[in-house]
Amino acid sequence: MTTPANVPAPITGTELAQRAAAVRDEVGKAFIGQAEALDQILIALLAGGHALIEGVPGLGKTLLVRALSKALDCGYARVQFTPDLMPSDISGHAVYDPKTESFNIRRGPVFTNLLLADEINRAPAKTQSALLEAMQELQVTIEGHSFELAPPFLTLATQNPVEQEGTYPLPEAQLDRFLLKVLIGYPSRADEKRMVTAVSQGRSASDFDLSQVQRVLGPEEIVAMQHGTSLITVDDAVIDYAVRIAATTREWAGIALGAGPRGSLALVRAARAQAVLSGRDFATPDDVREIAKPALRHRIALAPEMQIEGQSPDDVLHALLAKVEAPRQ
């Protein structure tokens, strides 16, 4: 297999797993606990997808992204979404230069490698949709001109599920562009004790010291790892299993709107990255099952009776996964 001159040679095998583990260890120095959430963010990174992170305030969503950006040593930008945020505040705009009597393009924060869209549901749909082209096409159009984004490009968006006053639901088309929806819950008591000790000992500041997080990768190495992840072997039976799971969401009694083909693709892409974190060069049905909830929970809409009963998307997906027969390994 010949690699194009402008694309780094893929990182594969043991080296791929080791580098992924190194990133996990470095981020874990600042982001204490929540191992499952961290792994899911790494899966999105390896699969070249975007992630929506949901959790109540104070659980370290922003800290996780900041620590990740330092370990990856790549371009990083943070945008605080507010009701008055305009699309041009994200993508950029043209500025008239009276000296040259011409317009110059001023690039927005989206021109980076790692974009933190903080509290994304606080901006109206028009502003949220400014990210759609960047997330799907890896390019931005300003004043009729298209500009490519340098790889890797990863959007990590956060939202608060509790405080809904003054927020705007994300458009379904944008939700579907997120590879995974990562839920962050409260830490265990042991992790919370470690967290409080790390922050409060000998310091008056109320945040973690990120100086202990060291550089592990660079942009080219990330692209090479993403290339290597895309080469992970996925048996036809495993692909069929992923497709059957997504297709079942369209027929399930408790689901009003099921996942589309992008859901099947997300399952397979994420399963490859899950295999990397497990140190394997092939994906298994267990990889698909393990990543199914993060890959599908934001792609389905529950039927009204499920919502009345207090069922969550994860509850319904749990029942669904128990009924879809997995291939024998």
Image (cartoon, rainbow, N blue to C red):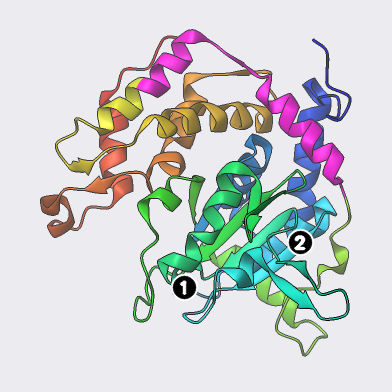
Which residue is at the front of the view, 225 or 171? 171
Q: How would you rate the neighbour count of disc 2 (Cα within 10 Å): few for under 14, some for 14-19, many for 20 or more?
A: many
Which span of residues is magenta-colored? 216-243
- Observer able to see residue 187: no
Q: Is residue 16 above or below residue 160?
A: above
Residue located 70% across and 66% down the image: 108
> Which x, y percent locates residue 227?
74, 27
- The picture places residue 63, in percent across and down from the top left corner, at 67, 67
| 219 falls in the magenta region | yes
Residue at x 31%, y 17% (from the top left corner): 325
Residue 244 located left or right of residue 132: left
Q: Residue at x 72, y 33 (%)?
A: 226
Q: Is residue 160 visible to the viewer in this orientation of the structure?
A: yes
- Say which quadrant the N terminus sits in: top right
Kindly indicate the quadrant of the structure image that contains residue 90.
bottom right
Of 294 and 96, nearer the camera is 96
Q: Amino acid at mark 1?
A: Ala
Q: Which of the 4 image quadrants contains residue 234?
A: top right
Residue 73, given in percent of the width and then of the height, sits at 85, 54
| Residue holding disc 2 | 76
Q: For this view, does 183 lie left or right of residue 134?
A: left
Please state the total of marks drawn on the protein image. Answer: 2
Structural distance between the alpha carbons of marks 1 and 2? 21 Å
Q: List x then y, in percent, for residue 247.
A: 29, 26
Mark 1: secondary structure: loop
Pick the residue in front: 147 or 251: 147
Question: Residue type at mark 2?
Answer: Tyr
